[in-house]
Image (cartoon, rainbow, N blue to C red):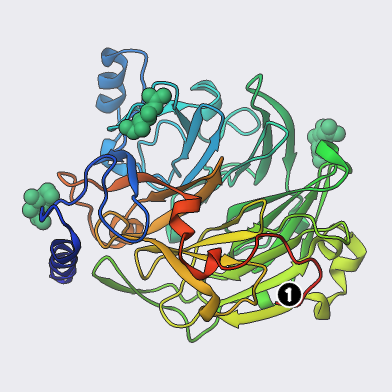
């Protein structure tokens, strides 16, 4: 039993490092590890939803609308007093795909998820008025929540395309949909699977907005222009997986995700030339790549700019990465799913392993850090044991899903990421 073997190593590791000497070593507000304290904000054995009352909840369980062990959180976002949590409809019984938890009460524990903006707009397969499956989402500085609904039910071979891929942009101040845009047939192909979004606000303010969504299995990047309300598809061989990087060992499981191409994206601050840099990486790869948004924002340029895409150094072995994020000072965080960890890179320095550091790591509490975000000086990490959910079975008497926070400043203190005066370098080559 590989899983238990790996976990016993994890437990040993915690025992060695934990001053508490407690096997759990995991308590709200007191995770022992790494450089900075990691606060366990929320933790769940299984997800639960805020039904109007217990009777409706029991009814949903009885008729199969809610199957507690089928919900896996995959994405988070923070906006003011809301913490959003997305749950894809990979299996039956997911009552809502876009949800939030109120942060007002400063609660910890296992809060129930409240559908956003409401239950009605979370009905599966009701194309145009309901969200079917949502992965990673983004709240921008203009109080808009960017949500790409893949329209899919199921995972892998079982996937049914119930509705078209649709970008929904919500006004977070009114909870109303501001914009709904169906991807054009030319934007996708028969392999398309899009689970990530980056939002680029330019110098021109809220209307000067572009969304970039990464087609992980169809190997493309779809660009949406808010101003023009249109989209186009960019292709590049750097979006493909590295055939030598498709083998994974996570949570005691060995598996192959050899086909996973462009996935995580992060945007630099605006540099002197007026544009951001989009950093991106295929999931099955150890490399980071970069391209200026000057190229992506221009439909014609983006078609014919092979050499504008830059290759950065490899992160080295055990550095598969799903999510990444860059803060306003040019500090990038990226999850390291093979290492149950999150790393950092200060983009004032060249991109190389020597300039990377680990800021959070926990071999039990951080098995598969699925999403990370930075908000008001805090790094948020959501971990979900996804490979065990997909390939084996989660142990529902154990905690499976966690949302953790740590202070960015404390997390990078004393690491290479904190080594230089902060500030984004501009047009340099990484
Ligand atoms: C919220 O909880 C944290 C950790 O227990 C505590 O440090 C903080 O002061 C609390 N904030 C409020 C507003 O109660
Ligand atoms: C954007 O385009 C879509 C169709 O492609 C259309 O349904 C929608 O009304 C447009 N929105 C705006 C604000 O122009
Ligand atoms: C499931 O998790 C619980 C709580 O951590 C643990 O006591 C139990 O041994 C686990 N079960 C298995 C089969 O590993």
In the image, farthest residue toward the right: 300
Q: Is residue 242 visible?
A: yes
Task: Look at the picture and state if 212 lies above or below 347.
Answer: above
Q: Quadrant of residue 312?
A: bottom right
Res 44 quadrant in image = top left
- The residue at the point 51 percent across, 62 percent down is 334
Q: Nearer the viewer, residue 216 or 15?
A: 15
Residue plotted at (44% across, 27% down): 103
Residue 261 coordinates in the image, percent (x, y): 57, 71
Q: Residue at x 56, y 26 (%)?
A: 121
In the image, residue 102 sits, relative to residue 324, either above or below, namely: above
**Labels in figure, total:** 1
Where residue 182 appears, as percent x and y from the top left, is 72, 43
Q: Which residue is mark 1?
A: 236
Which residue appears at 40% of the width and 66% of the height? 337
User: Is 144 placed left or right of 98 in the picture?
Assistant: right
* Mark 1 Cβ and ligand 2 under 8 Å apart: no
The single residue placed furthest to the bottom in the displayed view is 244
Determine whether, in the image, residue 150 is placed left or right of residue 158. Answer: right
From the viewer's perspective, is residue 403 above or below residue 258?
Answer: above
């Amino acid at each position: 039993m590989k899983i238990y073997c790996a976990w016993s190593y994890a437990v040993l590791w915690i025992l060695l490092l934990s001053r508490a000497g407690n096997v759990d070593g995991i308590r709200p507000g007191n995770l022992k590890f790494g450089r900075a304290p990691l606060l366990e904000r929320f933790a769940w054995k299984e997800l639960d939803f805020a039904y109007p009352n217990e009777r409706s909840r029991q009814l949903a369980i009885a008729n199969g609308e809610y199957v507690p062990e089928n919900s896996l959180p995959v994405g988070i976002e923070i906006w003011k007093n809301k913490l959003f949590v997305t749950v894809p409809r990979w299996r039956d019984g997911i009552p809502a795909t876009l949800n939030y938890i109120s942060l007002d009460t400063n609660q910890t524990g296992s809060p129930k998820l409240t559908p956003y903006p409401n239950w009605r707009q979370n009905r599966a397969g009701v194309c145009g008025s309901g969200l079917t499956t949502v992965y990673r989402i983004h709240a921008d500085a203009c109080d808009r929540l960017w949500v790409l609904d893949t329209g899919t039910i199921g995972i892998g071979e079982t996937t049914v395309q119930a509705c078209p891929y649709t970008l929904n942009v919500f006004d977070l101040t009114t909870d109303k949909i501001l914009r709904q845009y169906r991807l054009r047939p030319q934007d996708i192909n028969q392999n398309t699977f899009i689970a990530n979004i980056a939002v680029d606000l330019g110098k021109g303010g809220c209307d000067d907005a572009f969304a970039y969504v990464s087609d992980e299995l169809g190997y493309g990047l779809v660009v949406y222009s808010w101003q023009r309300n249109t989209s186009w598809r960019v292709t590049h061989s750097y979006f493909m997986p590295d055939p030598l990087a498709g083998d994974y060992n996570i949570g005691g499981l060995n598996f192959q995700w050899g086909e996973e191409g462009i996935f995580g994206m992060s945007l630099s601050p605006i540099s002197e030339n007026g544009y951001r840099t989009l950093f991106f990486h295929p999931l099955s790869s150890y490399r980071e790549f970069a391209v200026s948004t000057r190229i992506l924002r221009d439909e014609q340029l983006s078609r014919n700019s092979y050499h504008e895409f830059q290759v950065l150094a490899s992160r080295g072995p055990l550095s598969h990465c799903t999510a990444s994020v860059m803060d306003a000072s040019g500090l990038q965080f990226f999850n390291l799913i093979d290492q149950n960890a999150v790393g950092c890179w200060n983009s004032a320095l060249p991109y190389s392993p020597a300039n990377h550091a680990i800021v959070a790591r926990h071999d039990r509490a951080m098995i598969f850090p699925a999403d990370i975000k930075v908000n008001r000086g805090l790094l948020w990490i959501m971990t979900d044991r996804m490979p065990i959910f997909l390939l084996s079975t989660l142990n529902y008497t154990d905690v499976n899903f966690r949302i953790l926070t740590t202070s960015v400043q404390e997390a990078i203190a004393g690491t290479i990421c904190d080594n230089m005066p902060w500030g984004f370098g501009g047009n340099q080559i990484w």
